[in-house]
């Protein structure tokens, strides 16, 4: 593989030094090879960020705008995500950051990603012509971005405190580079996203039929791959889900105390396997097969319509029913089991819920958002810079997006939704047109508003 020399930048960020080297062909260790791309509108180059992170820098072919973007996602190869190509084609420098961490530990706690994002922001600010740097998160990168900005603005104490089930370690989190703005694109809610995947029907040895969302008796239609759950079943299900979540969290806290007191078989952490707790987008979520849950926003927001008009409206999710593969994989290690550790679970997925917990058509009730430092709404309360929440209406995050928006402390904050766009920005039906273009055109317009940056 051939290399060409690039300017070397040393940025003092605690113990981090940022070394930059461009190469003609770059690849990531996870997610397959990621080659720099060249088009008529942009080109890219591989950037090495210290010993534990790497980036792909997208730059426009012509003069770059004064605003640059940095993008990251937990435990994911970001290099081929659409943001880099789309926004560099619109004149922005975009740095896609991959945190690699310790090779012996493929997973990381949320706070471990923050120093590499800080180094990425510092690198972008070193480039001639860059005056502002905006942090962008998509999906699970949304809770990462909100956590980052909260800690960057307020210091490590922002993710600590007596209200936290598991306060974040402070090491390496002081003096993070502050972004000038935050964009959350179809963001999840952080720890709650995993809590909402807990299956209350899990039993030993048999499943509890009264709580099983995947049976016809409770409203699930396996042939049609959708469901219609009664109010009575939903109430019963959510109460049991909250109770099981409380037990899972309490058991994990008890094991943490055993580790700390030296009564565990392990000195630093413990393996933790949680049956019936879905992985990422999988899980026992009523709102996936039954679209009457998390169906629409409470308030009026900007809807970017397929006909090119922008209207103020109640944003209604137009998603089709989802989650049918979960019903076929109950008990599986792959989709329906959290194979993690005590500390990793407490850091990333533990959040408190009360007995009145429920997901309604336009809200999520009974969640103590501040109990987790990996909670997007709680971290949004510490975000004071200009912020954009942009949801995709052909997905189930329009209501979570509104919750995040309502928690933002920013005086300059915006909520908008792209009509008919899926979580990956493409249209879910042809009549919704070019939703990808509409998404990134809006981001460009938002960034370019006079006086914002």
Image (cartoon, grey):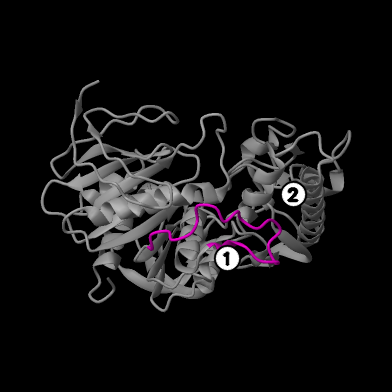
Residue 195 point in image, percent of width and height = 68, 52
- Local SS, label 1: helix
Q: Is residue 339 above or below residue 361?
A: above
217 relative position to 150: left or right: right
Give the residue displayed 51% in from the left and 67% down from the top: 380
Q: Is residue 205 above or below residue 280?
A: above
Q: Which residues are magenta?
A: 156-178
Majority SS type along the magenta span: loop
Is disc 2 surrounded by few (<14), some (14 to 19) or many (20+) residues within 10 Å? Answer: some
Mark 1 / mark 2, whichever is N-terminal: 1
Residue 96 point in image, percent of width and height = 34, 45
Residue with the mark numbered 1: 157
- Nearest the viewer among 147 and 8 is 8
- Nearest the viewer among 415 and 215 is 415
Give the residue displayed 74% in from the left and 42% down from the top: 214
167 relative position to 20: left or right: right
- Local SS, label 2: loop
- Nearest the viewer among 251 and 255 is 255
Is disc 1 surrounded by few (<14), some (14 to 19) or many (20+) residues within 10 Å? Answer: some
Q: Is residue 161 magenta?
A: yes
Give the residue displayed 40% in from the left and 68% down from the top: 387
Residue 396 point in image, percent of width and height = 54, 55
Query: Extreme left residue here?
Result: 62
Quadrant in which residue 378 is drawn: bottom right
Query: Extreme right residue here?
Result: 205
Report how far apart the C-alphas of labels 1 and 2 lie in the structure. Answer: 46 Å
Quadrant in which residue 203 is drawn: top right
Q: Let me know if residue 439 appears in the view.
A: yes
Q: Is residue 205 magenta?
A: no
Residue with the mark numbered 2: 219
Q: Quadrant of the C terminus?
A: bottom left
Q: Let me know if residue 435 appears in the view.
A: no
């Amino acid at each position: 593989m051939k290399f060409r020399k690039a300017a070397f930048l040393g940025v003092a960020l605690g113990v981090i030094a940022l070394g930059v080297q461009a190469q003609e062909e770059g690849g990531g260790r996870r997610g397959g090879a990621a080659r720099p791309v060249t088009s008529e509108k942009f080109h890219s180059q591989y950037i090495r960020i210290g010993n534990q992170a790497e980036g792909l820098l997208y730059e426009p072919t012509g003069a770059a705008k004064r605003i640059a973007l940095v993008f990251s996602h937990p435990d994911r190869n970001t290099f081929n995500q659409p943001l880099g190509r789309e926004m560099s084609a619109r004149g922005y420098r975009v740095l896609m950051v991959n945190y690699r961490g310790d090779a012996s530990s493929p997973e990381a706690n949320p706070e471990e990603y923050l120093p590499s994002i800080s180094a990425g922001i510092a690198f972008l600010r070193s480039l001639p012509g860059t005056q502002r740097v905006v942090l962008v998160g998509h999906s699970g990168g949304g809770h990462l971005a909100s956590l980052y900005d909260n800690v960057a603005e307020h210091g490590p104490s922002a993710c600590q405190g007596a209200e936290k089930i598991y306060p974040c370690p402070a090491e390496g989190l002081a003096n993070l580079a502050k972004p000038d703005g935050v964009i959350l694109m179809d963001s999840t809610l952080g720890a709650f996203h995993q809590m909402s995947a807990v299956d209350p029907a899990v039993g030993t040895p048999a499943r509890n039929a009264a709580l099983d969302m995947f049976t016809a008796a409770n409203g699930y239609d396996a042939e049609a791959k959708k469901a219609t759950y009664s109010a009575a079943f939903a109430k019963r299900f959510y109460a049991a889900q909250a109770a099981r979540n409380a037990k899972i969290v309490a058991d994990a806290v008890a094991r943490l105390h055993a580790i700390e007191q030296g009564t565990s078989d392990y000195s630093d952490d413990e393996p933790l396997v949680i049956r019936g707790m879905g992985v990422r987008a999988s899980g026992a979520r009523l709102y996936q097969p039954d679209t009457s849950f998390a169906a629409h926003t409470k308030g009026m927001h900007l809807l970017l319509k397929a006909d090119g008009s922008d209207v103020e409206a109640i944003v209604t999710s137009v998603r089709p029913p989802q989650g049918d593969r979960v019903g076929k994989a109950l008990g599986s290690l792959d989709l329906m089991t959290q194979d993690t550790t005590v500390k990793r679970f407490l850091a990333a997925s533990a959040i408190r819920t009360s007995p009145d917990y429920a997901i309604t058509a336009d809200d999520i009730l009974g969640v103590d958002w501040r109990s987790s430092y990996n909670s997007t709404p709680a971290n949004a309360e510490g975000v004071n810079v200009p912020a954009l929440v942009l949801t995709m209406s052909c997905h189930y995050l329009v209501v979570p997006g509104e919750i995040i928006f309502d928690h933002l402390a920013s005086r300059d904050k915006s909520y908008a939704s792209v009509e008919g766009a899926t979580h990956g920005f493409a249209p879910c039906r042809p009549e919704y047109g070019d939703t990808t273009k509409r998404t990134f055109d809006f981001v460009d317009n938002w960034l370019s508003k006079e006086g914002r940056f």
